[in-house]
Image (spheres, rainbow, N blue to C red):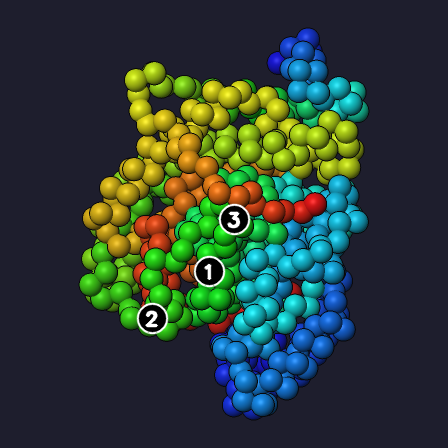
Amino acid sequence: MTELHWLTAAEAGRGFRDRTLSPVELLKALLERAEKLNPTLDIYVALDADRALAQAKIAETEIAAGKARGPLHGVPVGLKDIIDLEGLPTTCGSKILQDNVAKADAHGVALLREAGMVFPGKVQTLEFALGGPSFDLPKPPSRNPWNRDHHPGGSSSGSGAGVAAGFFPVALGSDTGGSIRNPASCCGAVGLKPTYGLVSRRGVFPLAFSLDHLGPLSRTVEDSALVLDALAQQDPLDPASRPRPDAASYARDLWRGVKGMKIGFVRHFHERDMPADPEMAASLEEAARFFAAEGATVRDVTLPDLNEFSAVNRNILQAEAWTIHQNWMRTRPGDYGQIGRRRLASGAFLTASDYLDAQRRRLKMIEANAAVFREVDVLLCASSMDPPCRIDDLGAIAKTYPRQARTPFNVTGEPAITLMSGLSKGGLPLSIQIAGPHWGEAKILQAAAAYERATQWHKMRPKEAA
Amino acid sequence: MDDKTLEVLAKQAGLDLYLKEFPEDLRAAAEQVEAQRKALPSHFTASDEPWPGMAFGKRSCRSTP
């Protein structure tokens, strides 16, 4: 029998509804696990066990009374510490906001609360979703459950490490330059960045308005689809929020397979633009062969240069982040960690024309990607170019952090999902990324689910969380 | 970047305190932007569309604090 902490959200929800498991029993098991492992993995930054137990008891009572709200009712979810959960601090991992207690739930949290989910607490983030991993902040950085000496990725580091270590089956993270998909890649989890505008960012501390996305991390594709089903509702108070163009359920349509699907393989990202680690490259080739064997048509496609995508993302991110942080940078520079202080100050040196040039390039890139998506249904490409490096090796982090292919889909706003594609010789996760056109979540989830079901990489368990 | 230029740019941005307390961090931030500018030289002319989208939202997005 599966240990309780490895149950997926879908399995737990089914267990609650057929009365073989109770939300209180699951939550208690997960809290015990957190008590045992948090001192070494540094995932939770704030726990609210009493309120979470009360939520789980209510869920138990409602389900017993035949009032189950849906597949996520009673299921615990971890929240990145830039997302407001009413009554708990939203510190953004920084001294700057150490006493900032949320007065209301973020829009996404409110939707998950309506779905009956349980909120055990807040999990670690890189400072303001950008600076780190840092050891000069109020709380230490999260560790990678596959090897705690290695970086778990960021900035949704606690979300990725937490699902991989069995602290909760699903978590929310944010993604401005890859921050959902990076920890998912580093920790062997699933990370989904939806289409820009599909999920409201209200109540999520911004990093860069035109690049920020909110989305799920999980151990399975199905669980990310279930959470996205709950999150994808228009919010009139987020100016970027748009109505979902179709009423289909991502989770219900998940198992359609890839037969007949047209898949564009963006080989130049990891072969020409940023040559990848050979094991990472091999796992991408293997994934392309898998899709072809399953009946998809796989062919090479060309997008704009990955380095240009990254540069455009960086300029826009830094300029927009500066508008948010400029006053604190002027008056409280010592309250930032060194990495965050350096990264966030860059925006002060960008000119208006740097920003506008980047935005113009961005429009051309959106057009270029859209042209490719007229020919294919989804893209297969790298997520990270390297397995995660040591967390204490700042040189290696500086070198490997930009070596990724996630920023293109922040620049264009297209949806993208990362998932595990193997283990390196060093015992660390490898990953692939599948991206789609705007509002193309259903297809990328279907492709990811087909790959996951066939490869079963999601059933591998990290050694630090054994 | 020479010290004088860094000082002028820092003061222009209101970063006097930052410059006093963390001059090396500020230099690293400025040099990062210099490197980015070299990696992404402007190649636009006035007639080279597209211009950035200028649509605005109906209401502002609430965030903490």
Which residue lies under the disc numbered 3?
A238
Residue A458 seen = no
Q: Which residue is mark 1?
A: A233
Q: Are marks 3 and 1 on the same chain?
A: yes
Residue named by callout 2: A253
Q: Amino acid at mark 2?
A: Asp
- Callout 1: residue from which chain? A
Q: Between disc 3 and disc 1, whose residue precedes?
A: 1
| Tag 3: amino acid | Asp
Q: Nearer the viewer, mark 2 or mark 1?
A: 1
Chain containing the residue with disc 3: A
Q: Say which residue appears at 55% left-offset and 42% top-offset.
A: B60
Residue A251: which quarter of the image? bottom left
Q: Residue at x 63, y 72 (%)?
A: A118
Give a yes or no on whether discs 2 and 1 share a subunit: yes
Q: Is residue A48 visible?
A: yes
Circle 1 SS class: loop
Do callouts 2 and 1 mark residues in contact (Cβ within 8 Å)? no
Whole-Å distance between the Cαs marked 3 and 2? 28 Å
Judged left or right of residue B37, residue A378 is left
Q: How many angstroms separate mark 2 from mark 1 (CA)? A: 18 Å
User: In front of the other: label 3 or label 2?
Assistant: 3
